[in-house]
Image (spheres, rainbow, N blue to C red):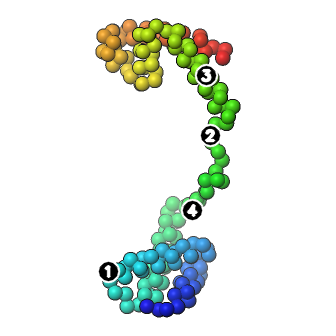
Amino acid sequence: MTKNWQAVFSRVKAALMRRGGTDDDADDLVHEAWIRLAFYEREQHVAKPEAFLMRAALNLWTDAYRAERRHGEQIVMEADLLPDASPGIEATVLARERASRLLEGLRELNSKTRDIFIAHRIDGMSYPQIARIHRLSVSAVEKHVAKAMLVVTSWMEGW
């Protein structure tokens, strides 16, 4: 293998930049081509590693160019540049207070109505499923849910 790889890397990078690549992109492609050469040499003898490196880098550039044409330019943003979408302290405190108020309102319900309401609204169970579990008619389950909604909404009203 050639001892002066730095010169080979410079020639490959220059070829990539002549094709319109940026400095950073060219560095990345040369690095990827070098990795491919190293892995290929584990299995096979490479008579002309410099030529292999050049061809691999040019093929990688062609693949990247085609992908960009097909999908548009991909923008990668660092996490610290993205706006923080998490709720602020005030919103978090208000949500906790609302949840606490809701729990107080649920305590106002009798246990059967509360269980049915939670099964439907929190656990996502259907009326027929709840009716089977509690051995009630679907109509009775609907009435329990309606009663719970009335109590909870009036409890939370104005808050």
Tell me if residue 128 can be seen.
no
The amino acid sitting under disc 4 is Glu
* Label 2 sits on residue: 86
Rendered residue at 35%/16% (across/down): 130
Pointer 4 and pointer 3: residues touching (CB < 8 Å)? Answer: no
Quarter of the image with the C terminus is top right
Pointer 4 and pointer 2: residues touching (CB < 8 Å)? Answer: no
Give SS at disc 4. loop
Task: Give the camera-side residue of 33 and 89.
Answer: 89
* Label 3 sits on residue: 98
- Where is residue 41 drawn, in percent x and y? 37, 82
- Where is residue 137 drawn, in percent x and y? 33, 9
* Label 1 sits on residue: 43
Task: Give the camera-side residue of 139 and 153.
Answer: 153
Name the outermost residue toward the right: 90
Asked where in the image residue 117 lies, by quadrant, the reply is top left
- Where is residue 153 drawn, in percent x and y? 57, 13
Give SS at disc 2. loop
Give SS at disc 3. helix
The amino acid sitting under disc 1 is Glu
The amino acid sitting under disc 2 is Ser
Q: First in sequence, mark 2 or 3: give its number.
A: 2
* Label 4 sits on residue: 73
Location of residue 144 with respect to 22 vertically, above or below: above
* Disc 4 from disc 3: Cα separation: 44 Å
Q: Mark 4 packing: few (<14 Cα in 10 Å), some, or many (20+)?
A: few
The amino acid sitting under disc 3 is Arg
Pointer 1 and pointer 3: residues touching (CB < 8 Å)? Answer: no
* Disc 2 from disc 3: Cα separation: 18 Å
- Where is residue 97 drawn, in percent x and y? 63, 23
Task: Give the camera-side residue of 38 and 49.
Answer: 38
Q: First in sequence, mark 1 or 4: give its number.
A: 1
